Image (spheres, rainbow, N blue to C red):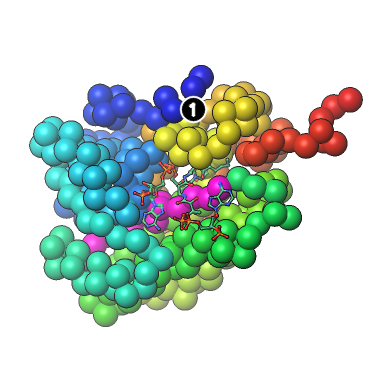
Amino acid sequence: MDKESYGLSDKQLAELDTVFASDSFSGKRVVISGGGSGIGKAAAWLLARLGAKVLICGRSYEKLMAAIKPMQEMGLDVGCKTLDIRNPEKVQTFFDEIMDELGGLDVLINNAGGQFPQPAIDFSPNGWRAVIDNNLNGTWFMMQAAAQRWRDAEKPGNIINIVTVIDRGMPDIAHTCAARAGVIYTSKTVAVEWAQYGIRVNCIAPGIIASEGMRVYPQEAVDEFPRSNPMQRFGSSWDIAQACAYLGGDASQFMTGEVMTLDGGGRLWGELWPYKKPDYFKPS
Ligand SMILES: CCC/C=C/C(=O)SCCNC(=O)CCNC(=O)[C@H](O)C(C)(C)COP(=O)([O-])OP(=O)([O-])OC[C@H]1O[C@@H](n2cnc3c(N)ncnc32)[C@H](O)[C@@H]1OP(=O)([O-])[O-]
Ligand SMILES: NC(=O)C1=CN([C@@H]2O[C@H](COP(=O)(O)OP(=O)(O)OC[C@H]3O[C@@H](n4cnc5c(N)ncnc54)[C@H](OP(=O)(O)O)[C@@H]3O)[C@@H](O)[C@H]2O)C=CC1
């Protein structure tokens, strides 16, 4: 399949079935970074359909507006704001504004992120820095800014960080493995530090998901991706959105500091080369 055609349509996102009760997020305020496309957009649709007031953010205003229009047309309570999560001052201003506009915050989904595939030996210093900045530093600025406000207001909070499956590393995206390992172990640590404030922190590790994010990878790599797990297929952004509904809701209230993996068993079987598998590793 052409990598340009990956991703769920707005019609699908409006109609896909969910196991969650239609009012299960009623009264909850949710912020989703990178909500203008892919997994973040699917989570925005689902949580808004379940009754949440949702605000998405990302770097491109046009992309955000295009994402929220069909949701608003369905009567869902969704808004947007531009934000580059790598800028700590802008992140602080963003939280000041949204706490005011939403009247507080219940769930933060740190989904914005990504990387480019390249053999690690060829990373430029700036390429390495860009990926660490986007995934580790940006996610941290968001987590800390939210937690400070929850602590100061003496309100509970809930953070979900979208990472990747890093158990065996991943050839061609070593920079993201480094960044996501940082996010996972920061999350485990602050899950303990922040339990006293009623703040939960969990991660979701998606395997290969058929989202718009696939456009970043060469077609030949994308064609191979389904063979990286024993189910031999892609997961859907909706799978990850439903995991967000579980972790963001009351059913998971005793869960913190965990990583929920949804990868079709890929962690246990198969291999993934997001760039191009070198001949040396191919079966003779
Ligand atoms: C498959 C496994 C599972 C995971 C799937 C997913 O995550 S799906 C989700 C997928 N979705 C996403 O990934 C979306 C988000 N991703 C992004 O926005 C970008 O990938 C980003 C993280 C680099 C940030 O962007 P930015 O605007 O900050 O970056 P910039 O343009 O300013 O460049 C900074 C440095 O990086 C260098 N460089 C960049 N590309 C390449 C390349 N292909 N090759 C080599 N190098 C590259 C660039 O040359 C420069 O270094 P230089 O030349 O100065 O030494
Ligand atoms: N699809 C997959 O197979 C997997 C995805 N993931 C992770 O899931 C998350 C979502 O990916 P997916 O939906 O597939 O791909 P997308 O590329 O569609 O989503 C990434 C989103 O993040 C936003 N974003 C990126 N950088 C920033 C930034 N600095 N500040 C604010 N927003 C930013 C982008 O919007 P904009 O460019 O407008 O800012 C975009 O909407 C990412 O973290 C990705 O790495 C993890 C494992 C597998």
Residue that lies at the very extreme toward the bottom in this rendered image: 152
Residue sitting nearer the eye, 123 or 139: 123
Residue drawn at point x = 55 percent, y = 37 percent: 217
Q: Say what amino acid the circle numbered 1 marks.
A: Lys
Q: Look at mark 1 in the image and give the residue it sits on.
A: 3
Q: In this rendering, would 29 be left or right of 148?
A: left
Task: Please identify the quarter of the rendering in which residue 159 is found.
Answer: bottom left
The percent position of residue 128, horizontal first and vertical second, equals 59, 61
Give the magenta range. 105-116
Q: Can residue 117 be seen in this view?
A: yes
Task: Please identify the quarter of the rendering in which residue 17 is found.
Answer: top left
Q: Which quadrant: the C terminus?
A: top right
The percent position of residue 22, horizontal first and vertical second, equals 21, 36
Q: In this rendering, would 263 be left or right of 84?
A: right
Task: Please identify the quarter of the rendering in which residue 106 is found.
Answer: bottom left
Which class describes the residues within 10 Å of circle 1: few (<14), some (14-19), or many (20+)?
many
Q: Can residue 147 be seen in this view?
A: no
> Magenta-highlighted stretch: main secondary structure?
loop
Residue drawn at point x = 64 percent, y = 47 percent: 118
Q: In this rendering, would 122 be left or right of 27?
A: right
The percent position of residue 279, horizontal first and vertical second, equals 81, 33
Is disc 1 placed on a helix, strand or loop?
Answer: helix
Q: Does the magenta stretch include residue 152?
A: no
Residue drawn at point x = 35 percent, y = 61 percent: 84
- Tell me if the residue at label 1 has its CB under 8 Å from ligand 1: no
The percent position of residue 232, horizontal first and vertical second, equals 62, 23
